[in-house]
Image (cartoon, coloured by chain):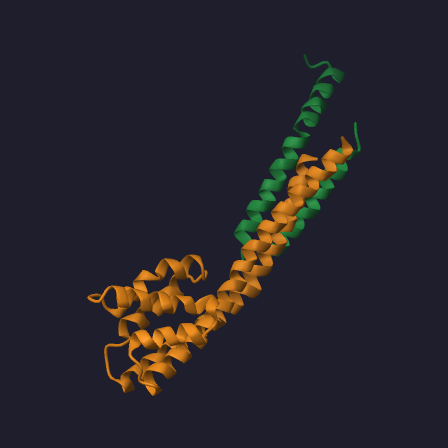
Amino acid sequence: MFLIKLFACLVVILTSSGLGFSYSRLYDKRLNNIIIFQYCIQILETEVVYAANPLPDALNEVYNKGNKKVSYVFSEICKYLLNNKKSDVYDGFLHIVSELKESLCFNKQDIEIILSFGRSLGISNRIDQEKYFKVIQMQLKGQQKEAEEEKAKSGKMYKSLGVLIGFGIVLALY
Amino acid sequence: MNIDLIFKIAGIGIVVGILHTVLAKVGKEEYGYIVTLAGVVVVLTMVLTLISRLFDNVKTIFQLY
């Protein structure tokens, strides 16, 4: 009986700790994805401003050169643009919103920044586009800083919260 | 009277204390207070029967029926 009890206690503690750790990993993931997304935007800037590629080619190039963990969203946009000839770039960005939210753990603010970038992408000349790229890079830098702070604060909190709540449940029920 | 209950309550007290500190440190004092309150309620439900027995005993000793 004692062994069964001990085993059950261990299961409860491990489960709640695991929950806490997996929740805190979301913050980790968001930070990493924002950094990788910035690299992707840099690649896209080179492709658009200096190489002067058409947008679908540029997006495909971003997918090939960037980290596949994030850059696959650009290939999604590319596919969307090629399949829906009548829609514009913004629709392509709207198409990947759920992907950004669920797979890449971006929050509302990040998505809004990316969407507003999507609104201005590919609608003006190269000098204007360069400015838009500068703007989104600055905004993403800000988001990165915020994500770092959030990770240091909430990530740690959820870790210790998971372990402590596990111990609390075991103590209360033992 | 078993001693285990005292250790149990002490353990819950320690865990709730650490939880309160952690939550207060990240700026979520309101949750910290809720956790403390929950801890108090859990401990109270544990000792409720004992307290009621104590009152019964007092009543019997002083013949307050």
The residue under the point 29% across, 75% down is A121
Q: Is residue B7 visible?
A: yes
Q: Quadrant of the C terminus of chain A?
A: top right
Identify the image quadrant of residue A4.
top right
* For residue A5, side relative to residue A18 (left or right): right
Residue B59: percent from the left, percent from the top? 71, 18
Residue B17: percent from the left, percent from the top? 66, 49
* For residue A134, side relative to residue B14 (left or right): left
Task: Give above or below for B9 relative to A134.
Answer: above
In the image, A30 versus A96, the foreground residue is: A96
Residue B2: percent from the left, percent from the top? 79, 29
* For residue B21, side relative to residue B58 (left or right): left
Q: Quadrant of the N terminus of chain A?
A: top right
Colour in which chain B is drawn:
green
The residue under the point 69% across, 40% down is A9
* For residue B2, side relative to residue A48 (left or right): right
Q: Is residue A134 visible?
A: no
Colour in which chain A is drawn:
orange
The residue under the point 26% across, 77% down is A122
Residue A129: percent from the left, percent from the top? 30, 82
Q: Residue furthest top?
A: B65
The residue under the point 80% across, 33% down is B3
In the image, A170 versus B47, the foreground residue is: A170
Task: Give above or below for A89 relative to B57.
Answer: below
Looking at the rendered structure, the number of numbered marks drawn on it comes to 0
In the image, A159 versus A93, the foreground residue is: A93
Identify the image quadrant of residue A108.
bottom left
Task: Give above or below for A89 relative to A157.
Answer: below
